[in-house]
Amino acid sequence: MAIKERKKLGDLLKEAGLVTEAQIIEAMTKKKPTQKLGDVLVDQGYITESQLLEILGIQLNLKSVSLYSYPIDESLTHLISKDFARSNLLMPIKLDNNRLTVAMNDPLDFYSIEEIELSTGYSLRPVIASKDDILQTINRIYGAVEFDLEQLGRDDSPAVRILDQLLISGVTMHASDIHIDPYENNVLIRFRVDGVLHTDRTLPKTLISSLVSRVKIMAGLNIMETRLPQDGRISTMISNNPVNLRVATLPTVFGEKIVIRILEMSNIFSNVKNIGLQEDTLAKYEKLIRQPSGLILLTGPTGSGKTSTLYGSINELNTPAMNIITVEDPVEYQLYGINQVQVNNDIGLTFASGLRSILRQDPNIIMVGEIRDSETAQICIRAALTGHLVFSTLHTNSAIEAIPRLYDMGIENYLVFSSVKGIMAQRLVKRICKDCAQTHPANQAERDVFNKRGMDIEEVTVGVGCNACRQTGYRGRMAIHELIVITDAIKTMLMDNANMKELEEHLRNTGVTFLIDDGLEKVKQGKTTIDEVLRVASLD
């Protein structure tokens, strides 16, 4: 075995000058019993995973490998169980002269090394690989064995194994959705990762019926109904993490299509500090949500993270002294201490009717998932004017466009400026992968983009692609924001029936940070790219 000295990871990182003793102590206090120190340091942002693996490789004289392109001997999966490989973050990749090469995320895991040597009879040669690289390889290699078509044909319950594998793969890849698409001759499996759909594999068309039935049974849907769309939800544990799944079925000409939305409880914002607001915007927003009454609106298209921001906002205000009630369609995350109402149009429980009932429940704070019609808008306005703090969302392109949208819904202008306290627009952009981020001097085209907004840029950061981000250069997403607090000056302009152009000019002159400006500021901070910001926000 290559490792002789059992030196602690913290000592290695300190010797390399990557962390301080204080940071290690802080990480140890935050570390859960099942977590490893290196993972906590990466999660806290003190080091990147690539730095962690690099220092381990140098100090321990171990080779670092890319499993994405490594010629793995798939027959070795019988030596190490899938559960052991996943729980200990390791993968057997090569056997040569009774020496088993195993890719490990933690080559200091002497328990696992000894266990493998005892169970296989081979001496073990550890090499280093990233956590995501190992997990994705486990899913790919072990999953290929589990998806063996001949084996599935002999299996009494292939749908159970297939669905379990798909859910584990989805969580491991940090996918937001799993698509099961039936076509004429096969079934296509796709995962949406960082907002982009990726094709994973195809399955025989003969499996679609049992797979749909398995999903419906887990989600409590009617397995006999195949002609109408159905919606349901599943609460389960996947890889020791609590996960809520939203299930939607849709009849198509080739069978029922299924979309499973993955809602990991660990991803929900616990407070507004985690939303990604710039420091000055965060201070304004925190002051805004602590007002005793009024209407606070979040705007943006579907999938822009509005619901997560709403949850973070009401979580911040969630104390035993507050009666917080929500009406949502659907209830995405179940929050302790908050009364959540699920819209059910089939029985007449709409946003409007639910909201009227909520007002008889003595609420302090109300969250309405979305203002979709004039009746809901009227009730929200009335609630905000009668001493309640109300949160809701609208689908508009910018924050200021929420005002004419309310006008279009029949709300008088004096009611709008009397009730609305603030509006925040939000978009999601991909975050640059920390493990492959590289900085270079800005070229003229990049400088021109910033100059057009009255900003300067000296250097920009991009992700060049690595195993951790599946060669995309991006890993995860973040929000950019545009916050408008309704001041006395804006109220006066609304009272005088100012048009949108005049309002936008006033906001620009008073220093409001628009979506494009917030995005470009995060480009300067090395968090995202110009291309991503221009994809969701306009320069003009």
Image (spheres, helix red, strand yellow):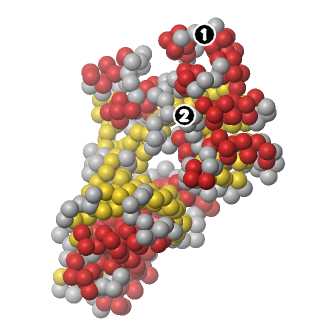
Q: Is 199 on the left-hand or right-hand side of 481? A: left
- The residue shown at (37%, 68%) is 212
Q: Between residues 201 and 157, which one lies in front from this camera angle?
A: 157
Res. 3 visible in picture: no
Mark with earlier residue (2, 1)? 2
Q: Which residue appears at 44% of the width and 70% of the height?
A: 223
Q: Position of residue 479 (x, y in %)?
A: 48, 39
375 lies left or right of 107: right
Numbered disc 2: secondary structure: strand
Which residue appears at 71% of the width and 48% of the height?
Answer: 325
Amino acid at pointer 1:
Asn
- Residue under numbered circle 1: 497
Q: Which mark is residue 394?
A: 2
The picture quadrant where one finds residue 66 is bottom left
516 up-or-down from 347: above or below: above
- Category of crowding for the residue at label 2, using alpha-carbon neighbours closer than 10 angstroms: few (below 14), some (14–19), many (at least 20): many
- Picture mark count: 2
- Position of residue 210 measured from the top left corner of the image (x, y, whole percent): 35, 74
Tag 1's secondary structure? loop
Q: Which of the pair 324/329 is nearer the observer?
A: 329
Could you tell me the amino acid type at mark 2? Leu
The Cα–Cα distance between marks 2 and 1, rounded to whole angstroms, is 21 Å
Q: Is 98 left or right of 268, judged from the image as shown?
A: left
Q: In the shown orientation, is residue 342 left or right of residue 167? A: right
